[in-house]
Image (cartoon, grey):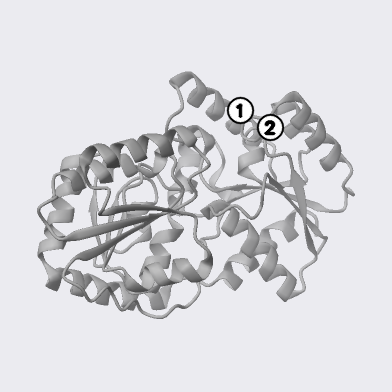
Amino acid sequence: MSAIVFAIPGDLSLPTGGYAYDRRLLKEWREMGVAARHLPLPGGFPNPSEADLSETGRAILSQSYDRVLLIDGLAYGAFPESIAAGLAGRVVALVHHPLGLETGLSPVQAAEFVRREAAALRYAAGVIVSSETTKRLLVADFAVPAERITVAEPGVDPAERATGSGGESVELLAVGSLVPRKGYDVLIAALEGLAGKPWRLTIVGADDRAPATTAALKTQVASTGLSERIRLAGALRQAELDAAYAKADLFVMPSLFEGYGMVLTEALARGLPILCTTGGAAAETAPDEAALKVPPGDVAALRAGLARLLDDGDQRRRRADAAWHAARALPRWRRTATIVAEVCAKVIP
């Protein structure tokens, strides 16, 4: 097959699910002997300046025509139609989740993102998504033909089973960047009504991607009087993150929307019981036996779910056993990388 040029905007080392997916594809391809290389794009996406677009155009047009362009959706979904049209027949678009579904956008901003991404996707020779949910969204709302979309679910590495905290207080763990879509304000509001129960919460995630959200969460925690029980840990190194998973008793994901929810499979791989929302693909990523699910953005429902699992250790153990069992069937990264490489091979054999 021809070489893959994987165009990714911004800092590839950032601790987000999308960048983790991209990094892992490149790693697996190196080990598999697939000819692929990373093409860095400006970090201004999905809101690129004219200078960003000019730099992007030069970088992509400098690539040989016998190479497949795999472009991360954080950039491709924000391309003007003129750029996307000029690349017709050469591009495989990787859509982690549609840009217009990011929380915090105004209706006008969201509509413009949807319009632009739908236009760009018309010119993609193939589209990779991380979940069946995202595939359905692209077919229904972005007019992408189903036959042009391939699902390549994120893989997960085998992990040791979590041992738990071993204490009287239930250790809650949430993982994901501090951005509006993650719904941490909803989680903190829910826990404020459960101050009389024994729990502690650690939120692990980059705190510099949405400074206003981070500041608001810190203010919210302080106003609840729960500063001693809620820790905003920031981004952690892998060893520290592994330790956080190991001592957790319950994994919580209050996201308003997820294109897949890689942290859910990380929790499953460690045999953790889960409380999550049904936002986006999260409803399907974690099996019902392992996860108690509530509607996104619903403080009362999340509080009720937390109370139920905090009070019922037997239910936590049953869901933990179900999670550990489900982990055996989770996809591995080598399979994910193979699927994406096969799609690229069909574009320019």
Displayed quadrant of residue 330: bottom left
Q: Is residue 263 visible?
A: yes
Quadrant of the frame with the C terminus: bottom right
Residues at marks 1 and 2 touching, judged by CB atoms closer than 8 Å: yes
Q: Is residue 217 above or below residue 147?
A: above
Q: Amino acid at mark 1?
A: Arg
Residue 84, x across and y down, in percent: 73, 34
Q: Residue at x 34, y 76 (%)?
A: 162
Q: Which residue is mark 2?
A: 79
Say which element carries label 2.
loop
Q: Is residue 216 above or below residue 238?
A: above
Secondary element under disc 1, as helix, strand or loop, is: helix
* Mark 1 or mark 2, earlier in chain: 2
Q: Which residue is identified by label 1? A: 116
Residue 245 pos. (x, y %) = 38, 69
178 with respect to 49 (left or right): left
Where residue 288 sits in the image (x, y, percent)?
25, 62
Does residue 347 appear left or right of residue 276 in this picture? right
Q: Quadrant of the N terminus?
A: bottom right
